[in-house]
Image (cartoon, rainbow, N blue to C red):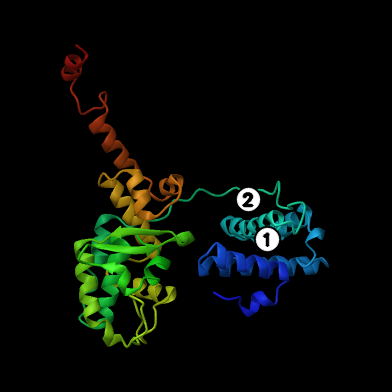
Amino acid sequence: MSLTAATKDLPESVQIFMTYMDVEKRSSIATLRSYEKDLAQFEEFLQSRKKSLAKLDKINADLVRAFLAKLHGRNLAKSTMSRKLSALRSFFKYMTRYKFIKNDPMVGIRNPKQEVRQPRSLNVDQAVNLMDSKAGVEPADKRDQALLEILYGSGLRVSEAISLDFYDVDTSSSVVRVIGKGNKERLSPLSDTACRAIDDYLAVRAELGPSLEEQALFVGNRGGRINRRQVNRILARMAEEAGLYGGVHPHMLRHSFASHMLQSGADMRSVQELLGHENLSTTQRYTHLNLQQIMNVYDKAHPLAGNQSSDSRSKDEE
């Protein structure tokens, strides 16, 4: 990704940093766009204070705190504020490392305390109803079914699914090659139903009008690579057909995949690998067990739980 017109309008320090993020760190397009937007917003704030990222030595922690206070005054979500601070932290860390500045103004700046929110998920019955909701014979119907199977059946992020090329999928081996966050590659398994759905879709993919050069696995009705907005619309329509309302979105399928894997006995480390999480703590946040599941495990496993009679416990104690 070359520098956009918006980046070229920003100070040279930002252009240097964005080139580093693109070429050396090989950050995703989504990350690059977020950093570009956040740094542009910080530059706009600085200019309102007669400062600029063109003069890095004039930027201090007080200015960063003032920027944070302005964001807080706009009632932004704490996660959004943290993301913006993360962009600034990466930028100034780079500038310090390569001696553009002596002191990092982000030192001592902490992210807002996050609200602990568990992502929503579908229960197993809802997931099954959703997977069975689309049974059309048109090429778009087969594409939608294959897309749904790979989102739920393999737990992919929507960005990972829409970035797939047709040669990334090997239904004969039941695996898909996924490029996740940080351009890290992993192999994810495909279910039997996903393999069948993908093969059915690939048989009619050409009818959606992709050019010979188009390598995208999932293409839109005009033949180009499908985008996130189109996926959201497809899922919303399919959820409505399945009688599911209240905002079913792609990440809910990923969370449902993880939750259902754990409820079926998968260990946390395996689910971490399947999701492509770098840290186990991230997996734990997205794959919490419900209280009933925990109680069931306790009743079956703990020697003092109610599933054993007092006589059997006495014999064990002997």
Amino acid on which the number 1 mark rests in the picture: Leu
Mark in the foreground, 2 or 1: 2
Work out whether residue 83 or residue 135 is closer to the camera in this orientation and state it: 83
Quadrant where the N terminus lies? bottom right
Give the mark, 2 or 1, whose residue is nearer the N terminus. Answer: 1
Q: Residue at x 42, y 76 (%)?
A: 227
Q: Is residue 46 above or below residue 270?
A: below
Name the spot of residue 66 as percent of width and height, x first: 75, 57
Q: Residue at x 31, y 72 (%)?
A: 167
In the image, is 181 to the left or to the right of 258? right
In the image, 49 versus 167, the foreground residue is 167
285 sits to left or right of 24 = left
Q: Is residue 208 above or below residue 10?
A: below
Could you tell me which residue is drawn at 64 percent across and 80 percent down?
5
Amino acid type of the residue tagged 2 in the rendering = Asn
Say what secondary structure mark 2 lies in: loop
Q: Which label number is shown at residue 111? A: 2
Q: Which mark is residue 71?
A: 1
Which residue lies at the image location 67% right of the left edge and 70% below the top edge?
Answer: 15
Indicate the position of residue 197 as horizontal and vertical percent values.
22, 71
Q: Is residue 108 visible?
A: yes
Residue 150's x, y, as percent? 30, 65
